[in-house]
Image (tube, grey):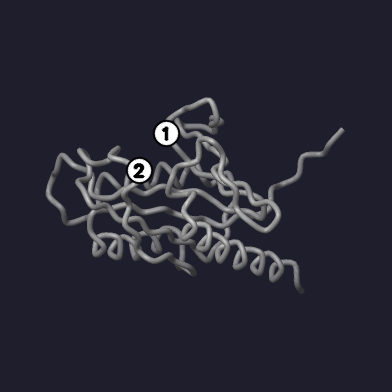
């Protein structure tokens, strides 16, 4: 019989999507107030993988990934997804009431073996966590590289995304080693 043990801490990642690079940049300080300093961020990339957000967010969307210095517990993912959803509804803070979303924030976490993303949408490949939040393993780390699944979103298949996530994984493993050292 196995004995339940607490999970290792994980590395928080948030994928940001917006039609304006300045909006992405202005979201980072807000997120840092909630989750601590950003220690790695990707370049801003054109996001043209689907028309899914066109009506809600406009055209010519941009994608940026950020990773946070403090490690978190995997169970924090539910709280963080609920908080980032609330941030989306009010961001930017000075904006008047509007009908369109300006910013999309998709939190997840990385550990040594996988990238997990949070979602409010249930699907066959997602497990229910709590409070209306589901989780999916989006990428598997195996034999030195990230590997997608059939359901993995196109932008998580990009070589530039994998290169960024390899940097995040390297930083994460260094943080784990530092925690174990006296």
| Badge 1 or badge 2: first in the primary sequence | 2
Task: List the residue tagged with mark 2.
Answer: 85
Q: Residues within 10 Å of mark 2 (few under 14, many from 20)?
A: some
Secondary structure state at the residue bearing disc 2: helix
Viewer-side label of 1, 2: 1
Q: Position of residue 110 (x, y in %)?
A: 58, 53
**Which label belongs to residue 120?**
1
Where, quadrant-wise, is the N terminus in this rendering? Answer: top right
**Which label belongs to residue 13?**
none
Q: How crowded is mark 1: few (under 14 residues within 10 Å), some or many (20 or more)?
A: some
Q: Position of residue 137 (x, y in %)?
A: 57, 41
Q: Position of residue 33 (x, y in %)?
A: 39, 63
Q: Residue furthest right?
A: 1
Secondary structure state at the residue bearing disc 1: loop
Query: Which residue is rendered at x = 49% and y = 57% of the image?
Result: 159
Q: Residue furthest top?
A: 124
Where 179 sits versus 10, above or below?
below
- Count the numbered circles shown: 2
Q: Is residue 163 left or right of residue 90?
A: right
Mark 1–mark 2 CB contact (< 8 Å) = yes
Where 136 sits versus 165, above or below?
above
Q: In which quarter of the image is residue 14?
A: bottom left
Q: Where is residue 6 in the image (x, y as percent from the top left)?
A: 71, 47
Kindly report the distance in space between the C-alpha atoms of the residues bearing marks 1 and 2: 10 Å
């Amino acid at each position: 019989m196995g004995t339940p043990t607490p999970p290792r801490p994980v590395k928080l990642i948030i994928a940001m999507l917006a039609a304006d690079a300045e909006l992405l940049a202005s979201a980072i300080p807000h997120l840092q107030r909630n989750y601590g300093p950003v220690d790695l961020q990707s370049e801003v990339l054109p996001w043209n993988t689907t028309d899914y957000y066109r009506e809600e967010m406009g055209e010519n969307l941009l994608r940026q990934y950020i990773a946070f210095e403090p490690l978190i517990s995997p169970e924090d993912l539910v709280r963080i997804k609920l908080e980032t959803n609330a941030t989306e509804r009010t961001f930017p803070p000075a904006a008047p009431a509007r009908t369109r979303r300006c910013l999309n924030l998709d939190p997840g976490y990385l550990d040594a073996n996988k990238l997990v993303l949070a979602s409010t949408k249930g699907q066959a490949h997602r497990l229910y966590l709590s409070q209306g939040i589901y989780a999916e393993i989006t990428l598997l780390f195996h034999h030195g590289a990230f590997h997608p699944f059939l359901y993995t979103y196109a932008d998580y298949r990009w070589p530039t995304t994998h290169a960024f996530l390899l940097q995040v994984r390297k930083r994460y493993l260094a943080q784990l080693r530092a925690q174990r050292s006296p």
